[in-house]
Amino acid sequence: MKPEQPSILILGTRGIPAAHGGFETFAERLALFLVARGWKVGVYCQDEVERVDQRVRVDSWRGIDLIHVQVASKGPRATLEFDWQCVLDAARRPGVCLVLGYNGAIFLTWLRLMRRKVITNMDGIEWRRPKWGRAARTWFWINEWIGAWASHRLVADHPVIADHLATRRPRSAISTIAYGADPVTSAPEAPVRALGLEPGKYLISIARIEPDNNILPIVEAFCSRKRDMKLVVLGTLSDQIPYHVAVRKAANASVVLPGAIYDQAAVKALRYHARAYMHGHTVGGTNPSLVEALAAGNMVIAHDNPYNRWVAGAAAIYFTDTQSCSERMQTAMEDDALVKACGEAARTRAREAFRWEDVLLAYENEAYRLLGVTSARTAAIDHPSPGAV
């Protein structure tokens, strides 16, 4: 008798095709990978509407079930409403539930009551971020504990995150699976020149403009002396947010602030042609943008902490404060041999630790584990599919 088709539901993102961030990109890659290997895959997508007239509808994209959930709320309330409605719907469908993030983990207790198998990617340690007030931090802290115990399996994207989760659950319940990136070996120069930039003559930061990403110190460090290159800071800026106003005020004429750019081809070109990639993140695990910088062969100038050290290794030079950041920038601008060596180390690190094929297969193995199958490679023999990766 032919084995039953394995099924998985992906919750916790705003949906695919990816247009928002790292989790959406990952969800898209994983969904396409699993469909090609014979899985039935559903991905929950958030539809923001003025009035809910059809709470849930399903359509198809490249063989994936896109499960659209309408929410009429705004802001954080909309996210919670969306998470709850997704859980209610997922409890009625077959399959393993893969939840990306734990911010609404309180709702996972319903999936457990309904006897659903749950894997949760626990993301970063959200309650440590300085941008949150006491109430938000308390909410995230509570949900981290609930997510840790309401899930059958936990995924950490970084060894330091795995160490943290081991204070909540036994290590036997935790797997460490990083993020992936495609190698970038060429890119057009047009998106670079459209911003008035010259390939190889600028540093770039691609991140949310927030205190824990050190964007303001990076801008201040760059502007602390005259430079022969420019600094590009990609990210949404609002005149209503004091930190953003401070960043604008600190920037001089050599700092380019184009806002957020959602054309991924343009972002890839800007990253590829940069002299070095600036990475000021201090909280979290394996950051997707840093992994993508390694895959593009970027020299990295990173804040010195265990997260970044493990990800970038010898591909980066590290800073601890504004002065050391300024010094590392100048080194990157002047030392061609070091830039080349770091770029080669970046590609090696990306190839060895952050290949999409390895990441996606590891997630498939986790899902099969909850279905009682020992490995995806074994299961693939039982479930062949055209175009399998």
Image: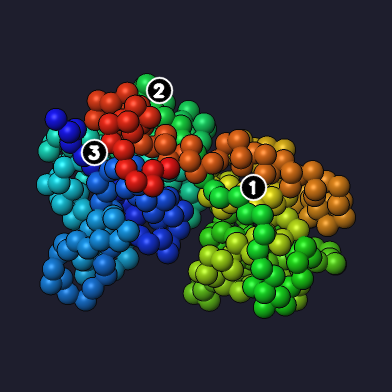
Q: First in sequence: mark 3 or mark 2?
A: 3
Identify residue for label 1. 294
Q: Residue at x 12, y 38 (%)?
A: 114
232 left or right of 73? Answer: right
Q: Quadrant of residue 191?
A: bottom right
Residue drawn 67% across the image and 59% down it: 186
Task: Give the image location of residue 335, x and y in percent.
Answer: 87, 51
The numbered mark, 2 or 1, whose residue comes first in the sequence reads: 2
Disc number placed over residue 171 in the picture, else none:
2
Q: How crowded is mark 3: few (under 14 residues within 10 Å), some or many (20 or more)?
A: some
Percent x, y for residue 66? 26, 59
Residue type, mark 3 in image: Pro
Label 3 to label 1, Cα distance in Å?
34 Å
C-alpha span from label 2 to label 1? 29 Å
Circle 1 Cα neighbour tier, 10 Å, few/some/many (<14 / 14–19 / ≥20): many
Q: Is disc 1 placed on a helix, strand or loop?
A: helix
Give the structural element (helix, strand or loop) at label 3: loop
The residue at 26%/67% (across/down) is 47
Observer-nearest of 299 and 368: 368
Mark 2 secondary-structure assignment: helix
Which image quarter holds the C terminus? top left
Residue 6: assigned label: 3
User: How many circles with numbers are drawn on the protein?
Assistant: 3
Q: Which amino acid does label 1 sit on?
A: Leu
- Determine the residue positioned at 21% across, 53% down: 86
Q: Where is residue 166 in the image (x, y as percent from the top left)?
A: 41, 26
Is residue 323 in view?
no
* Mark whose residue sits in front, 3 or 1: 3
Give the quarter of the figure containing the N terminus. top left
